[in-house]
Image (tube, rainbow, N blue to C red):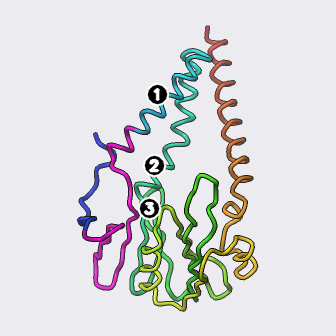
C-alpha cells in the first residue's frame, strides 16, 4: 500500500510555486511545493540503508536495528510535516496543518495584525534569507507562524492579503535580535538560537538511542 497516495491537486504549472484549492467561496488553501513521493521514499530508503550498514558494521544485527529505529524516529516527523503541511484562510478563521494534516483553526476575531519579515539564513548551509509571516493577537503574541523554506515569499504575501488584517513589513533583512526587540515573542527561541537548539536535540536523540541500545543488549543477555 502506498502511504503517500492522496487526492489529486490542481496543476502546479498553473499556480507557479504552490498548489492552491478553494473548497468554498472566499477560502484559500496553500500547499507548499514538495518533492515527489518516489524521490522522498528513495531518499528515506537510502538513508535507512546507510545508517543500518553503519550499525551492522559496529554492532551486528542489534546495532543495525537500533540505527534504523533511530533513523525512522527522526525521518518520520520530517516526512509527515513535508507531506501534510498547508495553510488555510477562510472568511472567519485561519490556521495551518502540520504532521497529521489537520489544520488547527483560529478565529479571525482573535487576530489583530500580521507581521511580514525577512530573517537571515538560520544555518550556513542556507543560501537565502528566510521569509516569515506571523499572525499576532491583540497583545502582540503570535497565533500562527509560517516561514521558509517550506513556504515561499509569494505564498506568504497571498496569505497576508487573504487574512485582511493590518500588516507590518520591513524592507530588506532584519536580524533576529531586532525582530525580538520590536515584536517580543514573534520569533520562537529555537529559531533565534538554532545552533544551541540543534545541539540539545542531538544530545537528546543520542541519549534516546543509547537507552534503546542498553535495553536491547540487556534483554539479549538475559534471554540467552
Name the foreground residue: 56 vs 23: 56
Q: Which residues are magenta?
A: 14-42
- Taking the view exactly as shown, the residue that stands out farthest to the top is 224
Q: Residue under circle 1?
A: 49
Q: Between marks 1 and 3, how big is the CA–CA gap?
A: 27 Å
The residue lying at 66 percent from left, 12 percent from top is 221
Mark toward the start of the polypeptide (2 vs 3): 2
- In the rendered image, residue 175, in percent from the top left (x then y), is placed at 69, 72
Q: Secondary structure at mark 3?
A: loop
Q: Residue under circle 2?
A: 79
- In the rendered image, residue 193, in percent from the top left (x then y), is placed at 73, 59
Q: Quadrant of the N terminus?
A: top left
Mark toward the start of the polypeptide (1 vs 3): 1
Picture quarter containing residue 135?
A: bottom right
Residue 173 position (above or below residue 167): above
**Discs 2, 3 touching: Cβ within 8 Å:** no
Q: Residue under circle 3?
A: 85
Q: Between marks 1 and 2, how big is the CA–CA gap?
A: 17 Å
Q: Quadrant of the C terminus?
A: top right
Q: Is residue 95 magenta?
A: no
Residue 107 position (above or below residue 211): below
Residue 35 position (above or below residue 102): above
Amino acid at each position: 500500500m502506498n502511504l503517500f497516495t492522496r487526492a489529486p491537486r490542481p496543476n502546479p504549472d498553473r499556480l507557479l510555486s504552490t498548489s492552491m484549492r478553494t473548497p468554498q467561496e472566499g477560502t484559500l488553501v496553500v500547499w507548499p511545493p514538495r518533492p515527489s513521493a518516489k524521490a522522498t521514499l528513495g531518499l528515506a530508503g537510502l538513508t535507512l540503508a546507510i545508517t543500518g550498514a553503519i550499525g551492522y558494521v559496529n554492532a551486528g544485527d542489534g546495532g543495525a536495528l537500533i540505527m534504523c529505529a533511530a533513523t525512522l524516529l527522526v525521518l518520520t516527523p520530517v516526512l509527515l510535516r513535508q507531506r501534510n503541511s498547508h495553510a488555510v484562510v477562510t472568511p472567519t478563521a485561519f490556521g495551518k496543518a502540520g504532521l497529521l494534516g489537520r489544520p488547527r483553526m483560529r478565529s479571525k476575531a482573535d487576530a489583530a495584525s500580521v507581521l511580514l519579515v525577512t530573517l537571515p539564513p538560520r544555518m550556513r548551509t542556507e543560501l537565502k534569507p528566510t521569509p516569515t509571516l506571523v499572525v499576532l493577537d491583540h497583545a502582540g503574541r503570535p497565533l500562527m507562524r509560517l516561514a521558509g523554506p517550506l513556504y515561499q515569499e509569494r505564498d506568504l504575501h497571498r496569505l497576508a492579503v487573504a487574512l485582511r488584517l493590518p500588516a507590518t513589513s520591513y524592507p530588506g533583512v532584519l536580524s533576529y535580535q531586532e525582530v525580538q526587540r520590536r515584536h517580543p515573542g514573534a520569533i520562537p527561541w529555537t529559531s533565534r538560537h538554532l545552533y544551541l537548539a540543534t545541539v540539545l536535540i542531538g544530545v537528546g536523540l543520542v541519549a534516546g538511542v543509547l537507552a534503546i541500545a542498553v535495553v536491547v543488549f540487556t534483554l539479549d543477555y538475559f534471554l540467552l
